[in-house]
Amino acid sequence: MASIVLKNVAKRFGSVTAVDNLDLEIEDGSFTTLLGPSGCGKTTTLRMIAGLETPSNQGEIWIGDRCVYSAERGEYLPPSQRKLGLVFQSYALWPHLTVYDNIAFGLQIAKLSPKEVEKKVKQIASVLYIGELLKRFPNELSGGQQQRIAIARVLVMEPAVLLLDEPLSNLDAKLRMDMRAELKRLHAETKSTIIYVTHDQLEALTMSTKIAVMNLGKLQQYEDPMSVYHHPSNTFTADFIGNPKINLVPATLKPDSSGVVVEIGAMNIHLDGVQYPEGSKASMPIKVGIRAEDFIVSAKEKPGAVKGSVYSVLPAGSQWFLKIKLSDDTMMTITIYKDLGLDTDDPIWLSAIPERVKCFDESGMLLFKK
Amino acid sequence: MKQKMLLGKIRQNATPQVIMAVVLAIILCYLVLVPIIVMIQQTFTVQAMERFQIPGSRTGDFTTRHWARMFTGDLAMAFLYRPLLNTLIVSISLALVSLLIGGTLAWLVVRTDMPNKKFISNLAIVPYIMPSWALALAWITLFKNRRIGGSLGLFEYLTGIAPPNWISYGMFPIILTLALHYFPFGFMLIGGALRNIDSQLEESAELLGASRWQVLKRVVIPLILPVVFSTFLLTFSRGLGTFGTPAFLGGPVRFTMLSTLLHANLVGQRPGMGYIVALIMILFGVLVLYMDHKVIGARRSFVTISGKSGMSGQVKLRKFGRPVSIIVIIFLLCVTVIPISVLAIETVMLIPGTYSLSNFSLHYWIGPVSHSIGLGTGEPGILRNAEVLNALFNSVRLGLIVSVICGTLGMLIGYTVVRLRGTRFSRFLDQLSFLPYLMPSIAFGAIFLALFAVQRGPIPSLYGSFTLLVIACVVKYLPFSSRAGIGAMMQIGPELEEAAVMVGARWTKRMGKIIFPMQKSAFFSGLLLPFISAMRELSLVVLLVSPRTQTATAITMKFTDRGWYPYTNAIMLLIVITILATTIVSRKLMKTDLAKGIGG
């Protein structure tokens, strides 16, 4: 059990900055996800915590009350002494060793007696339901089984923190669902700190207690999943999280009697009880983000709703995705949960749920924080 | 505080791969770059033998005499320009001829439905594993005429027609026999390239309406062109550095090439001139390397990209299939089994040049020392000739030691290059270890002669020692092993090692328990090529051997110089048998594939 603190850590590869002055505090016992597109620095961050990469001569890393890296004091603790377990994206199971030997390797390096090694391997094998696989070789196993072995190999060392680098990305869709549940259970049972790297926003939302959204080496937002989803701190986070993608369109913001008005073409959205930014002009250009499920849609004319036309209909079983074209050619993606019998080019009326509308200033930062 | 920080920094950065890269780079620099400097210096130095030719000079004085004599002297034509021209003509022609043979064979095997492919593929590699001048010996045995005196050639004996000089000796047979030795390069490299072309590339062209011929012309040939060019350069540079064949076939008609010129100069105690020849050859080697890199480097990549490469459509030979197959097999037998048989027959004919059953004798194999007229060589048969047996033993020992060192170094270089991938250091090491690949062999021998002739600092003079042979062969064949090592390491992701780092396994543990066990089969199959190369090497070792460290290949020179061909042939047969046996055994035991080692 341990918390992890990164203070002003950076990593540069030649002229490329992979991680840029990162500050991050990961709480003890949390399931924290590092989320971002490829090349955002999430894996590099994980590897710096593990000790496989060293930061570019700045900052500090603490695991629990132990400083494992400090540029200033010249401290560096090698990976094996950090009491971490790392599960690789490719599992990195040694193909020439049996499952048993794979799991036992670390214990043997630590010079445990063969009896103890056997006891521990058997124990972890029963926890992860891999007891009958111990004599096999990795290439005789399915992807899901290999995944379990990789986790067992790490857990048998009883790490204080478990690091997982995109562990599910090599599995097929169905297995991925199952493994998500298993990992969440594992977290609940072991109560260990887990740091999980992924580019899959759904995975991050469903599993984490906290998400650290990263882009271009910088931390974008660091909050619990629902906050990240409903109150994205900037347009990047808003855009990256959510499926289908959030509708992010240019708009005009004006003050009115009891709050502000957001004008998207012909669509006016009144936001109550919101303070218009002080010292601004009579109106300002902004960006507006509205999630696909945050619209009210009607096939008939309705007061307060604007008219658009159906560009295409994408049924998905329990829900329908609509592409709607507004009169000023703005496109909106909308999710509905009931079949309205719509066809291409049908007229449609829509309005947005005001309290779900997210406004961003021109630099992309969230306005009207709660 | 400061000291602690520095220590910390070293601990973070001095990973095993960095340390190893530094060590390897220093050793390779010493063995590859320093000798070239030494050679340049030697060409400007008055040599011990020349003190009296240059009045008032002492050994070690500065002089430009060698360069002046080589390039402008009265004898420059005979000393340099004629051999240079000969070498270029021979190397270019043999490269073209072997490309033509190898390319045609490759196309037939990969892209047609010719019968007996497997047999043909196996047979087509045999010329390459034989010593390069085995064919030259067979040629002499067959087409020897009376010019060099002694016995008759088999051809003249059978037909009564004396072959003209141009057929028996000189440029024509040199080009032909070398081309017949080197065509397997073209066969394997072009065959590999043809096999690797993604069939979808051709299918898309066909779907767009291209005819078979158009697909070949517009898609296939452009795709394999870089490999063809690369093969050409490789064969060219091999021709440049080869010594045995020009020595055997050129000697009788004073047909000189750079390699024989270099040998004559160094044996004749004229190192100043010899090293100039070596430098010229190295210059060509570097030029070839540069062209290979510049022209092909960027383009080569797309040849090896193979997606879901289903075997692409094969040309149906129909009724020509069988005849073509038979012609190819006859051709291959002509360059493998027949020359070996000719050599074998020669060794069991007591009186050379008389081919009859009554003349049959095992005298040259197991006969006693004889001083009688006609047979008075004073040498016992080779199987009871201590000198020859010692040389054979040396060859096998050399092959074994060199292959193990090469294999180990190759793996370490592969590890270092792959782990440091993307850094300048990795590229430097990669290129440095590849440099000897295209260096003319005999020039490489000269390099080591220059480097180890005298003591330099802590490094003793190794001239005449077995160690020197080992070092020279290791460096020369290192490209095979380092390519193989890099290729094998590429298959092993860094996380397999990192997983062991995470649990605290030290570097030696990781190498011993993770990396090596996973590389085992690649390691063992990588041993074969250096072994074979060392067994059949002549050009490289001919300048470096001493009576004590004679190799089987080098000792044949002694017998050939005296015209005692049956001995030469018998030794050659033993070498060929050893190599063939090793190849077959390792193929059976370890599923080694020679073709894989030759790429690059």
Image: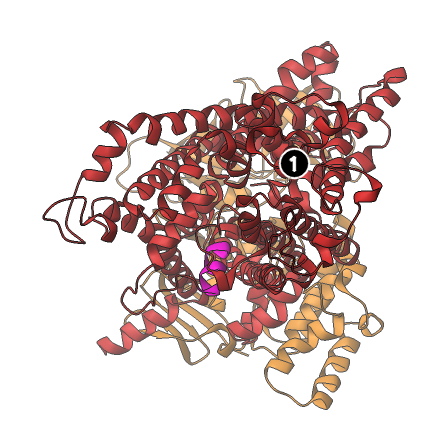
Q: Quadrant of the N terminus of chain B?
A: bottom left
Across the whole image, how many numbered discs are drawn on residues? Answer: 1
Where residue B40 appears, x then y in whole percent? 26, 45
- For the residue pair B390 and A23, the one nearer the viewer reads as B390
Residue at the (23%, 27%) spot, across then down: B72
Chain painted red: B
Residue B471 belongs to the span the image colors magenta? yes
Chain letter, orange in picture: A
Left or right, A338 with reference to A304: right
Q: Give the color scheme: rainbow, by chain, secondary structure or one colour.
A: by chain
Which chain letter goes with mark 1? B
The crowding category of the residue bearing disc 1, from other C-alpha atoms within 10 Å (few below 14, some 14 to 19, many at least 20), is some
Q: Amino acid at mark 1?
A: Ser
- Magenta stretch? B465-474
> Which residue is under mark 1?
B151
- The residue positioned 68% from the left and 32% from the top of the image is B153
Question: Is residue B581 something that shows in the picture?
Answer: yes
